[in-house]
Structure formats: structure tokens, C-alpha cells
Image (cartoon, rainbow, N blue to C red):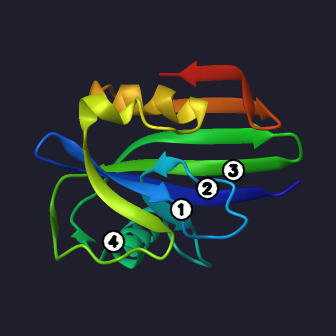
Amino acid sequence: MSTELTTLCYIEKDGKYLMLHRTKKNNDPNRDLWLGTGGHLEDLESPHECCIREVKEETGLDIVSPKLRGVITFVDNSWCELMFLFTADEFSGELIECNEGDLEWVDKDKVIDLPAWEGDKIFLKKLINNEPFFSLKLIYDNRKLKEVILDN
């Protein structure tokens, strides 16, 4: 089994996160869920570079100095993903239409109530509470969260 390498970034502004409601791609495992923006690392790309590129591609925004807040390992049967979790609160540019879904600024205190992966709510709470860097392993079985391993 190979491990996918990805990034996810939550952009902050005025007490809100920029959220992506995944509605536009066919066969999307995240369909109808709300996420930050991000994607897969390309060859020879660092997580930091990937984060900046993916945010630009999906939102049109140029983020400045994204902060690495955590590393998340997702496991589900024969699939594994290592995700580098970032936040950013400095950016320039204007939002564009995203080909993966609809972008919306959502109050941080309402983000937890949006439809999302169960494990995402765990790390979102840590981000909202401004907790220090963490490593989190989320073990799923057919998309249902079975085990959580947190290392602070």
C-alpha cells in the first residue's frame, strides 16, 4: 500500500475560515462535505510549496507564510494518506470560482457543525482553540472512524 501525500489549508479572516463545499466533481470521496483547500504534492514539491500552489489553484488567493499546524495520518482499509495541515491569515487576491465546489467564509464557531469527515472535526477543534503543533492518526473502516491516536 502506498501513502498519498497531501496538504490542507484553512484560511482565516475576521473570525472565519474559508471553506470548500465539495459539490462539483463526479466520484468525489468528499462529495457534499466541507473542507479547507489543498491537494496532492507534485514531484519534488515541499508541503509548503504544495499548500501555496493548491490554495492559489482552488481559490485564486496568494497566501503568505502558511503555518504548519499538524500532521494527520488517515488510514482506511487499503488506503493511507499523510496530510500536512496548515493555516494562513495573510493573503492577497480575489476569490475565483472553484471547479471542485463552492467557496464560503464560515464563522469558526459554526465550522464544526458543517457536514465533514468525523476526524476532521477533531483537528478543526484543535485549530480553532489555537492548540500547538500535533500529530494525529485517524483510522477508518469503510469511511467510519474507528480509532483516534493523538500525539501532542
Residue pointed to by mark 1: 23
User: 67 or 79, which lies in front?
Assistant: 79
> Mark 4 or mark 3: which comes first in sequence?
4
Q: Residue at x 83, y 57 (%)?
A: 2
The disc, 4 or 1, on the residue closer to the chain's N-terminal end is 1
Counting residues from the start of the chain, the first of labels 2 and 3 encountered is 2
Checking the image for residue 100, the label placed there is none
Closer to the chain start, of discs 1 and 2, is: 1
The one of 108 and 85 positioned closer to us in this rendering: 108
Residue under label 3: 81
Q: Amino acid at mark 1?
A: Thr
| 4 vs 2, front mark | 2
Q: Is residue 145 visible?
A: yes
Q: Could you tell me how far apart the alpha carbons at marks 1 and 2 are, in whole angstroms?
A: 6 Å
Tag on residue 59? 4
Contact? badges 1 and 2 (CB < 8 Å): yes
